[in-house]
Every structure is written in structure tokens, then in C-alpha cells.
Image (tube, helix red, strand yellow):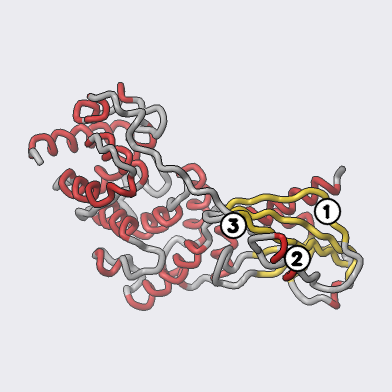
């Protein structure tokens, strides 16, 4: 790659960044980068938008401002704090990693790829992002925004998945010798604010003159889109149990599998068809159950879930051990999004 091309591109990128960088809670303009905060933010940002992450990041850092404090926390508190952010295995991995950092790394993030990649929940991208942003070390960092920029910049007419090796090589060649962290974050910002998926704002792009897709009028074609596979639909029956004291029954899910360690209303197995669901379906106890009209739908990363809700009111609270919560407090106890949807649907039906 032409050295002058590389230097001029990174120069334009960094000049733009100095004028336009986003003020994000983990970025702390004009302050020293905190590797712990970089790590937490990068995990939260996996498959989640910046705007969705901001309030969760602020709450998380306020409660656990260091590896040491996080390592001493209870996993259920971390899971409850994560409620609504989705992909809950991330929270479990953060907690597990904090204990490893406390026991083996003196409560500090390691600054080598080999050590970072060993931590639960940290893959090649996240390890690279931490190295570049927190430690200013040369690394390959390609998120969805940078991926789109590199595809357009080089006029690559391949789906992103088929161009990964090529993009990695290009990224290595383009990385500047200095300010690697700022350069990476600048590309992220340019991808978010300018080089957008559908309508890129090429007229204000700092790397427009380098862009093959712009020169050849291909920005609406690149990146090539792959057909998304349809998701299977699983079905479940969920139980809304109200005690004689007006409280609602909850249980905590296992720490493995979906929604690990999260609070939930009890349910049947989540099965792929009606026949399986009917065969495995059993009420938690015998009694006069009634069905609540309508169904609740929720989409996970690999499947959709359709939930039918059954209600039982008046069971003696002392006879059914578990977690009993005031109905009015259910929005404040860290329910995952699926259970919040169920609660909202039930309240809506009760008010009719």
C-alpha cells in the first residue's frame, strides 16, 4: 500500500475526529482512558446501540467503578442491573472475568492480546478494541461501522462475511503508527454518523477522495446484502400466579442457557411446535387456571417465541415457596424484556 495514501487517509480521519468526536460516557473527552471502562463499554456495545448502552453504562460504573468492586459483587445483582439490555451471557462473562482479573491480574486489564483473549466474553474484536482504545496498541478492530467503511473504501463487491480475511489485511495496512485508539474510534464515528448503511452522507465524509465506491457510484450497492435466514418460532405457556395476599410469584432462571440468572414468571418448556408443547405441558399445581386473552411475542437472536399466558389467583402464599413480589414493583426489580412484555400485556388485559 502506498505510504502517502495511508498517511493522508489517517490524517484526514484524525483531523475530522478532533473536531467531531462524540462525547460518550466511556470516552471522557480530555481525560485519560480507563481500561476498565473501555472493557465494560465494549462488552455492552456488542450487538447493542450506543444510545441503548449509555444509561446502562452509567448505572453500572456508578455501582461498580472498578474491577475490585465488581469482583466482590453478587452475580444476581449484576444480572438484574443488566435487565433490558439483552444478551445476558455478556453480564455473566463480565462478572466471571472480573474475578479472574482480581485473582490473577491484580484487578487490572492485561495489555496483551494473548491474555485478553483468555477472558470469558472477549473475542478477537473486543480484545483488539481494548488494546487500541485503552492501551494505544496496534490491533485489528473491525466492527459493523468499520467493516462498512472498508468495504466501500476499497470497492469490495462481496458480502462482509466472505471478505473478512481481506478486510483484516486492509485494516492492518491502514492503521497509523500514532493515535491508533483515536483513529479506530474515529472510524466508528464516521461509520455511525456519515458512512451509514442506507444513505451515506458522502459530501461531508473526510475520506471521500479515497473511496472507490464513491468514485464509481457504488455506495448504494456496497456492502452487498445477504438474505437473512428466517427464524423458527418456539412456543411456551407461562404462568401468572397471584397469592392470597395479592403478590406475584417469580423464580430465578439457571445460570446457564438463555436469560441466565434472571427473574421470570414460571413457564413450560420453550418448544418448536404445538405437539411438543402440549405433550410437555404441565401446570405448576392443580387448580382453577384461566387463560389470559392474546399472546406475547419476543425475538431472540436465533428464534422467535410466542407465549400463551395462564393465570391462577388466590393460592396461599405460605404453601408455595419461592419469590413473591408486589405487582406494583415488578417494573423495578430487573425483569428481562420478555417478562416486562408479559407483565405489560397482563396489566393491559386486566384493565379492559
Q: Position of residue 211 (x, y in %)?
A: 23, 30
Residue designated by label 3: 83
Name the residue located 50 percent from the left edge and 63 percent from the top edge: 91
Give me the disc on residue 278.
2
Report whether 19 appears left or right of 270: left
Mark closest to the chain's N terminus, 1 or 2: 2
Q: Position of residue 51 (x, y in %)?
A: 49, 42
Mark closest to the chain's N terminus, 3 or 1: 3
Q: Using the numbered discs, state the Cα–Cα distance from disc 3 to disc 1 in whole angstroms.
A: 25 Å
Q: Is residue 237 above or below residue 174?
A: below
Q: Which residue is situated farthest in the top direction here?
A: 203
Number of other residues with Cα within 10 Å of mark 3, as a class: few under 14, some 14 to 19, many 20 or more: many
- Nearer the observer: mark 3 or 1; the answer is 1
Q: Is residue 329 above or below residue 28?
A: below
Q: Nearer the viewer, residue 344 or 76?
A: 344
Q: Position of residue 89 (x, y in %)?
A: 50, 64
Q: Using the numbered discs, state the Cα–Cα distance from disc 1 to disc 2 in whole angstroms.
A: 17 Å
Residue 222: quadrant of the picture? top left
Report whether 177 appears left or right of 94: left
Q: Position of residue 266 (x, y in %)?
A: 73, 66
Number of other residues with Cα within 10 Å of mark 2, as a class: few under 14, some 14 to 19, many 20 or more: some
Quarter of the image containing the C terminus? top right
Quarter of the image containing the N terminus? top left
Residue 38: quadrant of the picture? bottom left
Q: Which residue is situated farthest in the front direction here?
A: 275
Q: Which residue is situated farthest in the left direction here?
A: 3
Residue designated by label 1: 292
In contact (CB < 8 Å): disc 1 and disc 2? no
Report whether 241 appears left or right of 333: right
Amino acid at each position: 500500500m502506498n505510504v502517502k495514501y495511508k498517511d493522508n487517509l489517517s490524517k484526514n480521519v484524525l483531523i475530522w475526529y478532533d473536531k467531531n468526536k462524540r462525547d460518550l460516557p466511556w470516552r471522557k473527552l480530555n481525560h485519560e482512558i480507563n481500561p476498565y471502562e473501555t472493557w465494560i463499554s465494549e462488552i455492552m456495545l456488542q450487538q447493542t446501540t450506543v444510545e441503548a448502552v449509555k444509561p446502562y453504562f452509567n448505572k453500572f460504573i456508578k455501582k461498580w467503578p472498578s474491577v475490585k468492586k465488581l469482583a466482590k459483587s453478587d452475580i444476581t445483582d449484576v444480572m438484574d442491573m443488566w435487565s433490558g439490555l439483552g444478551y445476558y451471557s455478556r453480564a455473566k462473562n463480565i462478572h466471571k472475568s472480573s474475578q479472574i482479573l482480581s485473582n490473577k491480574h491484580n484487578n487490572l486489564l492485561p495489555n496483551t492480546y494473548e491474555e485478553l483473549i483468555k477472558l470469558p466474553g472477549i473475542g478477537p474484536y473486543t480484545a483488539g478494541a481494548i488494546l487500541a482504545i485503552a492501551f494505544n496498541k496496534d490491533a485489528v478492530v473491525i466492527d459493523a461501522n468499520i467493516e462498512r467503511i472498508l468495504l466501500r473504501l476499497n470497492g469490495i463487491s462481496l458480502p462482509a462475511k466472505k471478505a473478512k480475511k481481506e478486510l483484516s489485511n486492509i485494516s492492518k495496512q491502514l492503521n497509523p503508527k500514532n493515535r491508533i485508539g483515536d483513529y479506530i474510534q474515529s472510524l466508528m464515528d464516521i461509520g455511525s454518523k456519515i458512512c451509514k448503511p442506507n444513505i451515506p452522507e458522502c459530501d461531508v465524509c473526510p475520506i471521500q477522495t479515497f473511496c472507490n465506491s464513491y468514485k464509481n457510484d457504488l455506495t448504494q450497492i456496497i456492502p452487498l446484502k445477504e438474505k437473512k435466514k428466517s427464524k423458527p418460532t418456539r412456543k411456551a405457556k407461562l404462568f401468572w400466579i397471584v397469592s392470597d395476599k395479592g403478590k406475584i410469584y417469580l423464580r430465578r432462571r439457571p445460570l446457564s442457557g438463555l436469560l441466565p440468572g434472571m427473574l421470570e414468571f414460571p413457564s413450560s418448556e420453550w418448544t418448536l411446535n404445538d405437539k411438543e408443547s402440549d405433550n410437555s405441558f404441565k401446570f405448576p399445581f392443580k387448580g382453577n387456571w384461566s387463560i389470559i386473552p392474546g399472546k406475547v411475542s419476543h425475538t431472540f437472536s436465533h428464534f422467535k417465541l410466542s407465549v400463551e399466558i395462564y393465570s391462577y389467583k388466590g393460592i396461599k402464599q405460605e404453601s408455595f415457596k419461592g419469590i413473591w413480589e408486589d405487582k406494583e414493583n415488578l417494573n423495578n426489580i430487573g425483569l428481562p424484556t420478555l417478562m416486562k412484555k408479559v407483565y405489560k400485556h397482563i396489566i393491559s388485559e386486566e384493565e379492559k
